[in-house]
Image (spheres, rainbow, N blue to C red):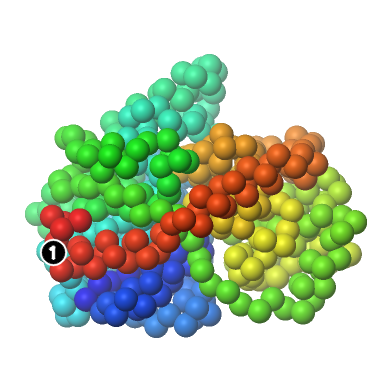
Amino acid sequence: MICLLPHCAYLSETSRMAAVYKALVARGADVCVATHGGSHEFYLQKAGVPYHLLEPRMDEARCRRFVADGAGLGAPNQSMYTDDEIRAQVAAQARFFRERGIQAVLTGFTLTSLLSTRLAGVPLATSHAGSCVPPVYQRNIMPAPSRMEPKFLELLPRVLQQRLSNWLVERVKFYCGGFNRVAGELSLEPIPSFAALLLGDVNLVTDIPEIVGISPEEMHSWTPSRSYRSPCKLRYTGPLFADQHADLPERVQRFLAAQQARPVAYVALTSTPTAVVQKAIAAVRRAGARVLAVSTVHDLNLTEADDLMVERFLPSLDVMPRVALAVTAGGQGSVQTAMACGTPVLGVPLQPEQDLNVHLVEKQGAGRLLPLADVGSAKMTAQVRELLGNASYREHARRLQRLFERVDGAANAAELLMRLATGGVDAV
């Protein structure tokens, strides 16, 4: 049996796991979903995906703290979980894997699975690194973070910021402390670097070579150095994003149908602080666009108007083809959904992996990157006007849409997991 282990603090990750689940079921695979719960657990219910709730549970408040402590946001000398939480999650997951006869696990950002799978002797596949994998930073492809820490590093020229950031990824042990303390207690191999914290035994590179800029041959032949655990393999599987369709509420359909005179921008900043979402909506409205926003876990406390509508949740795959612009935090799932719909993106990254996702699309001419510090500013309003007024952004997004149409990322992920479950890491 294959187990999917999403971290439900993240909507994009939860929705991607649902897509892989459906692809596995379509192929007759024996598959289950397990999670510690959280803010976006509701998505699994909406998608009709059955799941097991593991202890300790994560409620909405705990998920918010987890996101705030996450890589690129929280202090690097902590591990997002307390040591007790790591111990409890690892024990519960390992017990579940053994009791259910799990033969392979796919996770997103449920990082405790790095230990629980080793404890249970089960191979682990990961998807959350996306395109942020070793050949990318070894070739200096990652951009300098839009939120450089510590702040004094912003005094360096951007080219030096970029080189330093790429060099550091596999040389620092940020966020690893708690995991390694528990690994030591369990006599498990330690996690040697921040880069290794992001990678399992087999890692789904959920993108296409044309965008990443690295050939399949180079990606698949990469071998780990001492900065990584072994085994550690990289495999292109292609874009992976939510395939959940749903009927749009009638009021949303009317709102979208009335955009001939004024274009609609879709604001979906799902893991961003509430105040930032409010500022972003205001800046987009000042650019002359009408805003369709999703609130998810946020209480936006905004009064709807002719140019503003807010829904708690919307199926992005049904909305994005009908809007002129998508404003997201730059998670790979949301960026790829926009590209699959031929819709330009304005990305507001919260952490380095999102910087990379938006940077790669910006290089393709299909979007722009806006630093978090500029949300709500005149600069943001100007960028929205540029993205709406320059047809080349949509043309390039549609070019990427045609490339995406050639690849079924969920199907490729499912087939890789089936090989992993029946033949182990050597079969992948």
**Local secondary structure at mark 1:** helix
Left-right relation of 373 to 404: right
Image quadrant assignment for residue 247 = bottom right
Residue depicted at x 72% and y 78%: 249
Res. 26 visible in picture: yes
Asked whether, in this view, residue 325 is left or right of residue 214, the answer is right
Residue 93 drawn at (x, y percent): 24, 70
Specify the quadrant of the image occupied by residue 21. Answer: bottom left
Instruction: Tell me where residue 263 appears, x and y as whole percent.
Output: 82, 55
Mark 1, residue position: 423
Q: From what the image shows, is residue 24 above or below residue 230? A: below
Q: Nearer the viewer, residue 378 or 65?
A: 378
Give the amino acid type for the residue marked by disc 1 in the picture.
Gly
- Counting the numbered discs, the total is 1
Residue drawn 58% across the image and 74% down it? 245
Which residue is located at x 32 percent, y 76 percent?
Answer: 27
- Please state if 266 lies on the left or on the right of 227 as rendered: right
Question: Badge 1, how many Cα within 10 Å: few under 14, some, many 20+?
Answer: few
Specify the quadrant that holds the N terminus: bottom left
The x, y position of residue 377, in whole percent, is 76, 38
Q: Nearer the viewer, residue 399 or 172?
A: 399
Q: Residue at x 34, y 50 (%)?
A: 236
